[in-house]
Image (cartoon, rainbow, N blue to C red):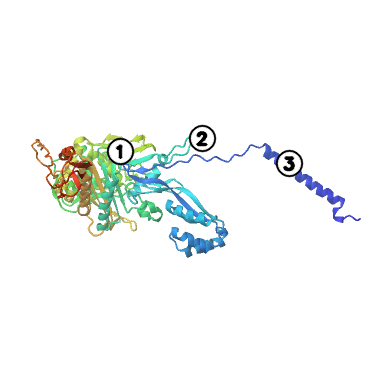
Amino acid sequence: MQVNGFFSKPRLIIIGAIAFVFTIAVLIRFGKLAFSPQQLTAPQLPQVERGSIVDRNGKPLAVQTNFYHFGVTPKNITDVDTFAHDIAVPLLEDPQIIANFIKNAKENPKTQRFVYLRKKLDQVTYEELAQICKEKKFTFARFDKIPGRVYPENELASQLIGYMGDDGTGLAGVEYSMQRYLSPVPKAVGEKAEQGKNVYLTIDANLQYKLEKIAKEALESTQGANLMLLAANAKNGEILSYVSLPSVDLNDYGSATIEQTIDRPAMTQFEPGSVFKVFSIAAAYDQGAFRQDELFLCDRVFEKTLNSGEKVKITCLSQHGYLTARGALEMSCNDVTAQITDRMNTETFLAKLRGFGFGQRVGLEVPGETAGSLKDTNDKYWSARSKMTISIGQEVGISAIQMLQAATYIANKGKGIQLTVLSKITDREGNVEYVHEPVYKQQVIKPQTADYILSCMKTGAEKGIGWRANLGDISIGVKTGTAQMADTKHGGYSDTDFLSDCLAFFPAEDPEIILYIVIQKAQGVQYASRIVAPVIKESADAIIDHLGMSRGNAASLEHSGKISIHQAEQVKLGQQLPDFTGKSKRELLHLLDRTDINVNIHGNGWVTDQTPQPGTKITENMKIDLYLE
């Protein structure tokens, strides 16, 4: 028999050598695997449930929930049209649109293995779809459970509350700044998971709703581009209302415009205009730059030429004649304010303004806060007119919360209070881990200076240009401002875009509440005394009523202090049942002693119903039921 020539001796040697080398390689690889350290799968850290954000009274503003992403493996779906028809109703979608989407996914190598049909399904929709997939045996469908957030009040205080992303991380507002409390980083494996804390804000949701309603009506009537309205407790620095319009529905954050998501009170800076005169006059009076009875002549323009030849010119809207500093605040006089400021040492003036907090961040518990801008004499843009221009609210950039912070110095005898939006933090069992206590700042102006400024602002509301904010029955101090906005296209100031704002304290003698409002780019009438002062009045009224503050015109009764208590008369029965309605339980108790009738008394209070009805003839052993509330 002849052997096949392929299996010659040299070839067999070569094949054997290859097999030997392969065997050695396998043994070496096996040895490495056998003696190398075992690679353990990283264990999953404990799950942390995110804490809630609530208002000062515990009303939920942001709460934890679960959402579900719904996806399929397109290549495994044999009957696309039937599947699309079965899931269309829960998804509130046209079956044909679903079918076309899946068919396109099947043809694309990148999506034929998996594609999401809908993200962030709520619990109800998920349960309905899951039941369909189970009954129809749609094994190619998958649900991915993800942590989610529900915002029960939708747009309420939306920029303050902020938003949480799909990965469970806060992206804006308090959701971002309080991330470490709301969702603590998981600890090491084996240790008990630290659950998220509940964050109580200082805002009152019901008051916030009322002021947002007022603000929206104001923004609509003025056709402004945006609006800010802040209210704070002057005694402890807690912000009670934080309005920024336009706002965003936090449950539909992905559809919002950039304008809707901006936290304007903290993030945007602007020139405040004449409201700033409050702090300029305060700084000057505190340094003894003028007497209360001293008169200054307003001839509509302040002019000055320095030794260097540089000229300064500040114009006024009116020729006011002779005014005191009080009159300058009442009439919002640029000329007199510039004259008073000119008397001050420049560095001392700027130091006072920085003492009020201008040019630096407030430190509120929100992200992205601007520091504003307050120039010094070394700034390349500093000029001879800068000091006087700053004194009337130009060449200075502030934020709304900076204005509110500065106002705390006026409200509290010259000693500021740190603003806050954080009331307390509790664990899941309600144990308090942090509670806000007022944090007092340094004394910037004398107590008598603060009192003088408040009295000037009170006069401004009573007979000055801020009269439209006057409450009548509760004293209020106000200062309005109207400022030209920067022309971002051509430089300089715009001839059409204005900012209107107003700062208010009430009661003026010893402020409990600080209010500040800003409307930008109002159409038509733009003077703050006309468009924002009335909003201050309406907002102050809402706050006073909501907080139950005592009003001068509240209804009252005079009483001698003597109270007469009339003895209740017992009900007498004749031949017919009387009408028991309105009778007290005390007046009915003696009927229980009767043996000829059966009386049953239900409840407490006064009779609202009875059986049988009045007028029914009374018979032996009659059953009578009386219902009291």
Residue under numbered circle 3: 27
Labels 2 and 1: the sequence-earlier one: 2
Q: Amino acid at mark 3?
A: Leu
73 on left or right of 604: right
Residue 568 position in % (x across, y down): 12, 39
How far apart are the alpha carbons under marks 2 and 3? Answer: 38 Å
Label 1 SS: loop
Q: Amino acid at mark 2?
A: Gly
Residue under numbered circle 2: 190
Q: Amino acid at mark 1?
A: Gln
Q: Which residue is pictured at 28% across the width and 47% down the height? A: 208
As drawn, which residue projects farthest toward the left?
A: 560
Residue under numbered circle 1: 418
Q: Nearer the viewer, mark 2 or mark 3?
A: 2
Residue 169 position in % (x across, y down): 44, 45
Asked whether residue 342 appears in the rendered view, the answer is no
Asked whether residue 191 appears in the rendered view, the answer is yes
